[in-house]
Amino acid sequence: MRLVFMGTPRFAVPVLEQLLQSEYEIAAVYTAPDARVGRGRNWSFSPVKEAALKHQLRLEQPATLKTAGEVEKLAALRPDLIVVAAYGQILRQEVLDIPRYGCLNAHPSLLPKHRGPAPVADAILSGDEITGTTIMLMDKGMDTGPILRQKEETIRPEDTTVTLEERLAEISAYLMRETILLWIENSITPRVQDEKEATYSRLITKEDGNIDWQMPAEKIARRVRALQPWPNCYTRWQGKLLKILEAVPVGTKAGVPGKVIMLSDSDTMVVGVETGMGILGLKKLQLEGKNALSSRDFIQGYRNFIGTMLSA
């Protein structure tokens, strides 16, 4: 059986690696075009492109699959199945109709919850205790297709988007490989998603990282975990950008939102910030242009930090 794989970020790589260990032929790998990044504007390859080059797979990087020429090129590959994992494009019906077994997508949430581009971060932001991954048969909507299989995963108190996404990627990879076999054997009955239960994540922006100290400490702590590795949560101190890299809510004491206070003599957390409800204990910080430091090391270098105000 011939497969075409479509994916772009690191999340998609384990799915591709599992397909490479199967008996299926991978006719081509589709991924996002190269992009210029950073101040030097150097060219950057997607993680999926790096994996495809490593395994000497045919690589396609169209800016869009909406043109007739690109649809014809894909059809000429004669795929029996298209496997998708965070590709970054919504596939039109003429693409979905090409493979005889359709297009299967690995989505890191328990659909219909957290449809859209940032499901892992959205699950943390929402305070969910359980998330998971879904293998669905794609239709022309955004993550609206019938569900084939799902597997749950617990969200740990210390999870960031990075750590949770890594686990979901591995789960998705094994679940996809198992699902393909069951699907082509006609051993799965697709389950239509319940639209009444649907929720949607949105694309994360840099502005989402700007901390509003009027928010409860618990919600700010979730944002700190969810907005990693980008854009991170940040505030301003004495006119400089200050990233909050690790933090936990501490108590429910009311205070002045944004005020920095001394917490305890702990080795890992000695500084807190008063919020709209409770105190946010700071564990790791990074001042603009400096290295990341524990809060203990930070106040050793900036003894005037305690008692000052942080601002948006």
Image (cartoon, rainbow, N blue to C red):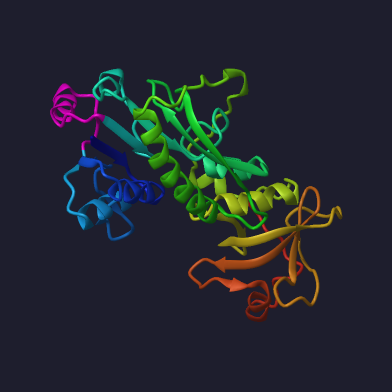
Quadrant housing the N terminus:
top left
Q: Taking 123 as reference, is 211 above or below it? A: below
Q: Position of residue 166 (x, y in %)?
A: 48, 53
As for residue 155 lying within the magenta part, the answer is no
Q: Residue at x 42, y 21 (%)?
A: 141
Which residue reaches farthest bottom?
300
Looking at the rendered structure, the number of numbered marks drawn on it comes to 0
Residue 44 in the image, given as x and y percentages of width and height: 27, 54
Q: Is residue 44 visible?
A: no
Position in image of residue 161 (x %, y %): 54, 51
Which quarter of the figure has residue 80? top left
Identified at 65% across, 40% down, the residue is 126
State the image quarter where residue 294 is shown: bottom right
Instruction: Residue at 24% x, 43% y: name it.
Output: 33
Q: Who is closer to the viewer here, 135 or 214?
A: 135
Above or below for 36 versus 138: below
| Picture residue at 27% right of the left edge, 56% below the top | 41
Can residue 9 be seen at all in this image of the molecule?
Answer: yes
* Quarter of the figure with residue 292: bottom right
The image shows residue 164 at horizontal and vertical percentages of 54, 51
Highlighted range, magenta:
62-80
**Residue 75 lies in magenta, yes or no?**
yes
- Comparing 296 with 258, the one in front is 296
